[in-house]
Image: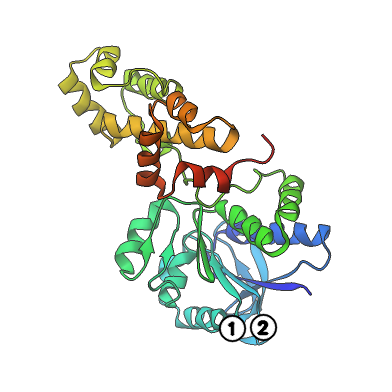
Amino acid sequence: MQRRVLIVVFPGFQLLDMAGPADVFGTATLIRRDAYQVEVGSVSGGHVTAGNGVPVVTRPLAEVTEPVDTLLVAGGPSVPERLADTALVGQIARLAAGARRTASVCSGAFLLAEAGLLDRRRATTHWLVADDLRSRYSGVDVDADPLYIEDGDVWTSAGVLSGVDLALALVARDHGHGLARNVARGLVVYLHRPGGQSQFSTAMRALTPRSEPLRELQGYIDANPAADLSVPALAARAGMSQRHFSRVFTAQTGMSPGRYVERSRADTARRLLEVTGLPLDAVARESGLGSPETLYRVFRRHWRISPGDHRRRFQSKER
């Protein structure tokens, strides 16, 4: 029996928030003919224009009375003004009440929150607007780090293309990882990045330094996690006093040197756990964290999971 997927859009929505998941579900159906039936709906129905000017044909949401398996709400630059659209928010709440699960892509999480669907739930959204979601909806436990989060029957995902990762995870849940893997191959996308993966690496988290020597130093830190990356060593490499180096590095990157180094080493350890079979002591050593005990503490601090659990959940099967 086909699972019905309804993707909710509105004027000014992000086209990829709709098209990415739709292609995932559509490709799954090309491989397995009874997998999904995908529809796109809006309050008004008819042609709805995305934020990039592309029109999409939609079905009026009020006409959707049959059961929906998966309700997926897109995001987009016009979301802030759509929060006052009581017809849109009301239809989302109505359809979610009858759906097996509800999901959002990017800033679509704001519409779920406005509909009361994220109260007392953990959720994510694009990192650029995560603070706004947190301040606007105090009842939502916002975590800006993961690519997507599942909390009960509600799923939320980060910015734009993470909607593809979310959709692949839903396919894997519904029909197994084999089908999700074949869909990813067909679309030539990264094979099912796990939801627990960070939206961005340490280098993406940090500001780009204005100073060329500090930019080079960032690259050195990321490329040499097992080196001596203490403040005295880094200051000497940058040709500065320790105090001046710490002040300038923090001002230009938004992170203290120690925090940047720990984050970079944690990212390295995460990649080693996902793509190698190295024992934990070797992962700790090669990532510069030194010992399995430190590796464990860092993982718990940054990702709320142990290194062993992360490997079991996220290790590539094709390494």
Residue 73 vertical position relative to residue 180 in the rendered view, above or below: below
Residue 219 location (% of width, % of height): 42, 23
Based on the displayed image, in which of its 4 quarters is residue 217 positioned?
top left
The structure residue drawn at horizontal position 30% and vertical position 13%, both measured from the top left corner, is 237
Q: Amino acid at mark 1?
A: Gly
SS class of the residue under badge 2?
Answer: loop
Left or right, 284 with respect to 97, comes to left
Residue 305 location (% of width, % of height): 43, 49
Based on the displayed image, in which of its 4 quarters is residue 43 positioned?
bottom right
Q: Amino acid at mark 2?
A: Pro
Q: Which residue is mark 2?
A: 67
CA neighbours of label 1 inside 10 A, class few (<14), some (14 to 19), many (20+):
some
Q: Nearer the viewer, residue 286 or 36?
A: 286
Q: Quadrant of the C terminus?
A: top right
Q: Which residue is mark 1?
A: 98
Residue 211 location (% of width, % of height): 31, 22
Residue 267 location (% of width, % of height): 45, 35
Distance between mark 2 and mark 1 Cα atoms: 6 Å
Residue 194 vertical position relative to residue 38 in the rendered view, above or below: above
CA neighbours of label 2 inside 10 A, class few (<14), some (14 to 19), many (20+):
some
Q: Quadrant of the N terminus?
A: bottom right
